[in-house]
Image (cartoon, helix red, strand yellow):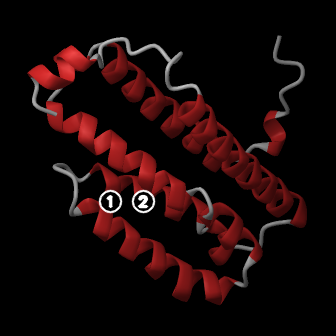
Amino acid sequence: MFANLNFTRNSPFSFVEYAFQAYYATVFLMVWLHPEQHPLSLINDLAILMAFEFIMVHSGVFMAVMPKKLSLFVFFPMYGLFAVAFHHSVINTNILYIYLLTVLNRMRFAFSDVSMEVRAMQIGKSVAKAMLYFFLIFAVCFGNSIIPKFGLTEEFLEKSKF
């Protein structure tokens, strides 16, 4: 069953990243299916998080291909400013935690000598994520009428004054 998965090529950082993504995918799905069971502010926070991820999806590529000092002294503070700005538009501190965990995971390229194979794999994953993100944005924009509303119906949004 797992014959095609090469676990020796994945570092522990990769599994942390995958677990993190699975957790937030589950949160998004649970709020989409049953928004009445969650604080209304969480809907806003998740929408802000999607916009923040649009910016963060590029950081993997930049931090993998740029020189170490440039990553450390330019990209880390630059994305940090985005994180602080987005943090001020949400109720809880999840965006700052997500930023710190994501960037610390990606900053391993600035603090260690990573092989070109690992670097190339990170670049490929980051490019694939960015392309998927753009594809999904267009799919949602053009297919908005066929995407199921689940719990986020017009009635729920009006009732909750969202």
Nearest the viewer among 21 and 89 is 89
Q: Residues within 10 Å of mark 2 (few under 14, many from 20)?
A: many
Tell whether label 2 touches label 1 (CB within 8 Å): yes
Label 1: element kind: helix
The amino acid type found where label 2 is placed reads Tyr
Q: Which residue is mark 2?
A: 99
State the mark number for residue 96: 1
Which quadrant: the N terminus? top right
Q: Residue 67 at x, y = what percent?
A: 73, 85
Q: Residue at x 89, y 23 (%)?
A: 4
CA separation, marks 1 and 2? 5 Å
Question: Which residue lies at the image location 43% right of the left edge and 24% below the top edge?
Answer: 26
Say which quarter of the image contains residue 9. top right
The percent position of residue 124, horizontal first and vertical second, equals 81, 53
Q: Residue at x 28, y 13 (%)?
A: 34
Instruction: Report the amino acid beneath label 1.
Output: Leu
Spot occupied by residue 7 in the image (x, y as percentages of width and height) = 79, 34
Relative to 24, say whether 84 is above or below. below
Residue 12 in the image: state x and y as whole percent. Answer: 64, 45
Kindly indicate the quadrant of the structure image that contains residue 108: bottom right
Secondary element under disc 2, as helix, strand or loop, is: helix
Q: Is residue 35 left or right of residue 136?
A: left
